[in-house]
Image (cartoon, rainbow, N blue to C red):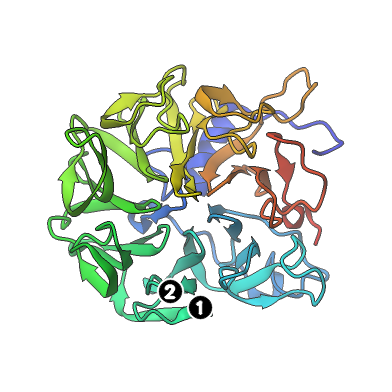
Amino acid sequence: MRSDPRRSRSPRVLALAIAVIACSSRDAGVSCSPTPSCSLNPERFEPPEAIDAGTQACGPDRRDRPRCSAQQVALGRAHSCALAPAGEVLCWGDDARGQLGGSSSTDEDAGRADDLRFVLTDARAITAGGAHGCAIDAARAVHCWGDDAAGQVDGVASDVIDTPVVLEALRADAVAAGGAHTCALAEGEGVHCWGSASHGQCGREVAERALEPGLVAGTEDAVEIVAGARHSCARLASGRVECWGELFDAEAGELRAFAAPRPVPGLEDATEITAGAGFSCALRANGAVVCWGANASGQLGDATTAPAETPVPVLGLELALHVAAGGAELDGQLVGHACALTKSFVVQCWGRNREGQSGSAAAEDLLQPVVVQSERDDEDPHLDGITAVTAGGFHTCALEDDGELLCWGDDSFDQLGARDPVELGYPVEVRVFRGEF
């Protein structure tokens, strides 16, 4: 962490930052949960002021330029991406399937935090899936890259696409990358999905693949889309939520494949949704967070490991501004964790924590939320100045109001971007966003 004392920030300043930077309250422009998933809704998003090309904050050659500043972060299974104010997309971490999506900034230490990939230069929003990513530009074009084994990048199944391609037939207002599928929302038309359909997650049929984007019936009034490991959910204008793919079925007592959207029981007032590995969460109008689905890691936060078809309240959690779910398949089992940014600007997490992704030094699952701390022995250990939190497969990141990033959890592929020793459960600073490569 920084050696200099953290500056104090008033709730009024933080509230303003949240409205501008997004990924937080119901009025924010980018609702992240990248996953692996991140739902992007530009109707609620005011793009940053254009920055002159000569003074861009980031770029492959950053000599004599200010440090990078992040305005959004998206996390996959073992990689991370960030969006800078001028529209540059930077990625780091695992690149085994082309998920970093661009040219390297150095020939040494491939996959390290200082081997950033500069993917695009004109994006307005980003999302990360299991091993692929997508971005939307100002013209509403969808750019995707990475693992395409199931057609989740270009709808063709080209194995690996290590530089972005544009889906020519699609213009979208939001996009969400799941484990091996992708969904996009075109307002007034509905949700289109493509990629792996082995559990019905593309909303048409249970099949090996759903090549080319296809419309999900009954989603015409959707205003938000999220994608989990093997399922998808849409929030409708009314506040109702519908999900499809691999969902927990109480009657069968197990996860089952549902190709058609199913309404989430008892949830009529959702203002934000997020999807992880086999489970989902929603922020309700009053700030309460509820979750449903698989619960083997305690990711529902209800002090049990029992799955639930009907949303259950997260116990011990303050009223929240934003919620993010993550996780992935591990040894055939879906494991997950979730985090929330509360109305007192504290980050609380719960669920799987074997890799420290829920912010505790205890390498065990957390059945209820814990507060993520910045320092072990700090008198005031809470993270300060946080405006958004995002959960990946086995790691988590928080965005600060000055554009810096803090990440914690698994660092096997340098997805935390620190290149410093990582202490289990404690956040570290992403180097490039503190002015270093």
Residue 365 figure quarter: top right
Residue 415 figure quarter: bottom right
Question: x, y (%) of residue 326?
Answer: 48, 44
Question: x, y (%) of residue 207?
Answer: 24, 67
Q: Which residue is mark 2?
A: 149
Q: What residue is drawn where x is 60% and y is 28%? A: 364
In terms of sequence position, does the residue under pointer 1 or pointer 2 come before the other? 2
| Residue in the foreground of this view, choosing between 429 and 112 | 112
The circle drawn on residue 160 is 1
Question: x, y (%) of residue 432?
Answer: 74, 58
Q: Residues within 10 Å of mark 2 (few under 14, many from 20)?
A: some
Judge left or right: residue 249 versus residue 61: left
| Residue in the foreground of this view, choosing between 213 and 206 | 206
**In the image as oriented, which residue stretches furthest toward the left?**
218
Q: Quadrant of the N terminus?
A: top right
Residue 273 figure quarter: top left
Q: What residue is drawn where x is 76% and y is 28%? A: 375
Badge count:
2
Q: What residue is drawn where x is 40% and y is 23%? A: 314
Q: What residue is drawn where x is 77% and y is 64%? A: 114
For the residue labelled by badge 2, is the local secondary structure a helix, a strand or a loop?
A: loop
Marks 2 and 1: in contact by CB < 8 Å?
A: yes
Q: Is residue 208 above or below residue 285?
A: below
Do we see residue 347 in this rendering? yes
For the residue labelled by badge 1, is the local secondary structure a helix, a strand or a loop?
A: strand
The circle drawn on residue 13 is none
